Each structure stands twice: as structure tokens, then as C-alpha cells.
Image (cartoon, rainbow, N blue to C red):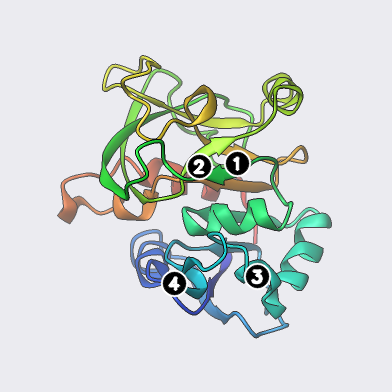
Amino acid sequence: MSKFGVVIFPGSNCDQDMIYVLRNIMKQEVVELWHKDTDLQGCDFIVLPGGFSYGDYLRSGAIARFSPIMEKIIEFANKGGYVLGVCNGFQILCEAGLVPGALLHNNERKFICKNVYIKAQTKDSLVTSSIPSDKALKIPIAHGEGKYYADTETLKKMNENGQILFRYCDENGNTTEESNPNGATENIAGVCNAGKNVFGMMPHPERASDKELNNSDGKLIFESILNLVKA
């Protein structure tokens, strides 16, 4: 069993969903970490959940990046500790410089909440190792600033280094312009850092991990994590 820490910021609203999946479905030890905490309580894996930290003022994640706990999370990540940011958590990781790139307003300048399809782009990462390379995962998104952007040179390095985790695709796994819900560069839905221990993704796997919801595609991502994380 691994010990997961789920960070709660003012405005987080997917924290309990994440805790439920990790604790009740994946049967892991989970602790709640308040954003003002400075002790990660010996966690093996830190999760930054979705929501609207600090009301998304300035930019999504821009204020949360300076919460006291982030200093410890940055230290943890720089020492090789595992960190996953989902949606708003991904935005916070970008603001903190823990993963490359930025998340901009969706092309249509509207909040989008719907199921989309994503496809793993590499087997060489903790969150994609158990996902069949030909499978399109149906995972919901819910964001207004989810358009991933990085400059050409950064994207070249990321592609060469296997840092693109997921791309938006259609239900058959084809990466098309029509299957890109927000205008993300290269249809990118998730990335990791160069050290491959910090992961960010816009879709919400915790909302697609319970058979009661008639969709458990997201569970494959948690199973990938647990296959490799050792307590």
C-alpha cells in the first residue's frame, strides 16, 4: 500500500472525488493536506486536485502556486518525489514551473464540461505504463483554461524525451482537429517533466474510475501508478 497526499486549496472541489477513488476503489492510504501545511506527512505520492483554487483570480493556479505547501512539494518533486496535478492541479504545476508549458483560455472562451477521448502517447511513464497503446480512454474534462501551449523548441524536446503523456483523440484513437476540445497545441492533454516524476493532465480520471458511473477508463491511470509506486 502506498501513502497518497491530496492537497486541498481554497476553492478545490475535486479533492473528495480523488480521495474516494484512491481510498475506496484503489484501497490506498490517503491523507488530506491543507494548503497551509508544511509537512507532507511521509507521503509517497502527492496529488493536486481539480477545482478553482483562489477563485482562479489572476490566472488559474497563479495564487495557489504560492501556498505554503507548494514550497515543500517543489522540494519533494526536485528530489524525485511523485506528483500528479489534475485540471486545476495541472495549472498549478505549470505556474510553479514543475512541468513545462502553460494552460491558456479555451479557443471558444467558454467553460467546457463533457466526455472526451484521450490516448496514451508513451509506455515510459508512471501514469501510462499499463494503458494499451491503441486504446482511446473516455475521460471527462471540465475547464475554461485548458488549452496547452509550449513553444516550438520546448515541444521538440518534450516529444523527443517522451514527455507527452496524452493527446485528445476520437473514439477510435485518431488524433484529429475535430477531437481537440480546447485548441491545445498538438492535441496535448497531459505532460510530464523531464525527470518523469511530475505529471499533469486536464481530463479528470477520478471521474471515470467507478463502475457505478458506467465508466472506469480512468482507473487504468491509477492502476498504472500503483503498479510502479512502492511504499
Label 1, secondary structure: give it: loop
Q: Which residue is mark 3?
A: 43
Q: Earlier in the sequence, mark 1 or mark 2?
A: 1
Q: Nearer the viewer, mark 1 or mark 4?
A: 4
Q: Which mark is residue 224?
A: 2
What's the CA distance linking mark 2 and mark 3? 18 Å
| Mark 4 surroundings: few (<14), some (14-19) or many (≥20) residues within 10 A | some
Marks 4 and 3 sit apart, C-alpha to C-alpha, by 20 Å
Q: First in sequence: mark 1 or mark 3?
A: 3
Name the mark nearer the viewer: 2 or 4.
4
Q: Which secondary structure, mark 2?
A: helix
Is 1 in front, or is 56?
56
Q: Label 1 sits on what residue type?
A: Leu
Q: Which mark is residue 126?
A: 1
| Residue 209 x/y as whole percent | 31, 51
First-in-chain label (4 vs 3): 4
Q: Which mark is residue 12?
A: 4
